[in-house]
Image (cartoon, helix red, strand yellow):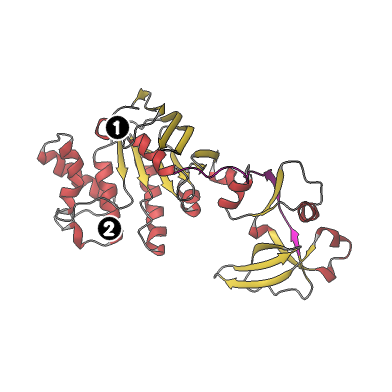
């Protein structure tokens, strides 16, 4: 591909549906060639924001720029973008090659050139030689690749992904995830990716924008957001941290006073089970607990425990025994902004 990637700039964009604010004054910058994920639960506004960038929705306020050009009012076909949909949006009566060439034909590309570019795109996603096969005869994973080939065939400046792996089984999703990242790096296309799967966002992204109630509430590199989440919501959604708001319990685990407006975040892998009878002088930093349940997860075991009336989760080696006098100690922790009262009003 000889086209250069383009940066995306979203400036104070708002989108309402009746009384519901789906996206509320969001600003986001995606550097040229970067892979940025919009992460969050259903209804947080991430897909609406993606559709605003792609031209499938028009904002009530704000602007969208791609490569420096204002595209806020342009329809999808007039933007240098291509979308990979969650449902793939393939035509079941067409062949693989016809599906991939469809976007090219709608852009006025001659039939012969469209066929050649479609075959090149199929080769990039390891589907070379399948152009004449009925798309309905392919597996789910192969259909996902056809949808991706159709998107890259038009040589966009920007690729948009709306949860494209959600319809695949776990093993295939993990394998396709690695292939997708490798392909994006090879092509160097600016990519904006929507997902509710934190593992997917961490694995694929150069940067992650975490959304809640129609707003971006945290943004950074996957490593940075995981290690230093700024808020309780970010800590719990990205990595499943135990968020402790009880002052007495938080201060005992942290060993220091609890700052105003803060909560204690302790990740499951950083909460250690210990035998309180063996702690001696360090007993003051440990909290007595009782086991409620244990799940074997293969590489880890997940413990469900209760301490001072609070249920907490920790991950251990599957061979770790339950101490006779069970107590908990925080190996690592972080004070985070307590944003529990943020309204969940997005669509």
In the rendered image, the quadrant that contains the C terminus is top left
Q: Residue at point 68% right, 44% down?
A: 336
**Residue 189 visible, this angle:** no
Q: Say left or right for 2 vs 288.
A: left
Looking at the picture, tell me which residue is in the foreground, 199 or 59. 59
Residue 165 screen position, x and y as percent: 37, 54
Give the magenta-colored segment's residue range.
Answer: 328-347
Residue 8 screen position, x and y as percent: 41, 31
Residue 249 screen position, x and y as percent: 77, 56
Label 1 neighbourhood size at 10 Å, few (<14), some (14-19), many (20+)?
some
In the rendered image, the quadrant that contains the N terminus is top left
What is the secondary structure assignment of the residue under circle 2? Answer: helix
Label 2 neighbourhood size at 10 Å, few (<14), some (14-19), many (20+)?
some
Looking at the picture, does residue 30 appear above or below residue 317? above
Instruction: Specify the principal SS of the magenta part.
Output: loop
Looking at the picture, tell me which residue is in the foreground, 230 or 341. 341
Distance CA(mark 1)–CA(mark 2): 25 Å
Looking at the picture, does residue 247 appear above or below residue 306? above
Q: Is residue 27 magenta?
A: no
Location of residue 80 (image quadrant) = top left
Q: Residue at point 64% right, 72% down?
A: 293
**Residue 232 visible, this angle:** yes
Looking at the picture, tell me which residue is in the foreground, 36 or 175. 36
Q: Earlier in the sequence, mark 1 or mark 2?
A: 1
Q: Say left or right for 181 vs 332.
A: left
Query: Which residue lies under the disc numbered 2?
Result: 142
Q: Residue at point 35% right, 27% down?
A: 72
Q: Is residue 345 magenta?
A: yes
Query: Which residue lies under the disc numbered 1?
Result: 80
């Amino acid at each position: 591909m000889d086209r250069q990637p383009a940066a995306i700039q979203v400036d104070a964009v708002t989108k309402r549906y009746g009384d519901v604010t789906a996206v509320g004054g969001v600003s986001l910058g995606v550097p040229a060639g970067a892979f940025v994920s919009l992460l969050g639960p259903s209804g947080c506004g991430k897909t609406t924001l993606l559709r605003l960038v792609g031209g499938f929705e028009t904002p009530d306020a704000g602007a969208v720029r791609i490569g420096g050009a204002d595209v806020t009012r342009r329809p999808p076909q007039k933007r240098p973008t291509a979308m990979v949909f969650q449902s793939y949006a393939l035509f079941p009566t067409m062949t693989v090659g016809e599906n991939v060439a469809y976007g090219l034909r709608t852009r006025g590309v001659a039939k012969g050139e469209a066929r050649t570019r479609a075959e090149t795109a199929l080769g990039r996603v390891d589907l070379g030689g399948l152009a004449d096969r009925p798309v309905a005869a392919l597996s789910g994973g192969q259909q996902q690749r056809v949808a991706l080939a159709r998107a890259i065939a038009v040589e966009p400046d920007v690729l948009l992904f709306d949860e494209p792996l959600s319809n695949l089984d776990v093993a295939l999703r993990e394998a396709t995830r690695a292939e997708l990242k490798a392909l994006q790096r090879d092509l160097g296309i600016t990519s904006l990716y929507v997902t509710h799967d934190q593992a997917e966002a961490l694995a694929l992204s150069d940067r992650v924008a975490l959304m809640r109630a129609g707003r971006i509430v945290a943004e950074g590199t996957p490593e940075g957001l995981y290690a230093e989440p700024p808020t309780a919501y970010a800590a719990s959604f990205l990595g499943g941290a135990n968020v402790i708001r009880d002052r007495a319990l938080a201060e005992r685990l942290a060993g220091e006073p609890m700052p105003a407006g803060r909560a204690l975040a302790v990740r499951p892998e950083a909460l250690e089970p210990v035998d309180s009878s063996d702690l001696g002088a360090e007993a003051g930093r440990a909290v007595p607990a009782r086991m409620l349940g244990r799940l074997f997860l293969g590489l880890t075991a997940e413990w469900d425990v209760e301490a001072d009336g609070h249920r907490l989760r920790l991950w251990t080696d599957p061979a770790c025994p339950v101490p006779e006098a069970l107590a908990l100690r925080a190996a690592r922790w972080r004070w985070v902004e307590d944003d529990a009262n943020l309204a969940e009003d997005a669509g």
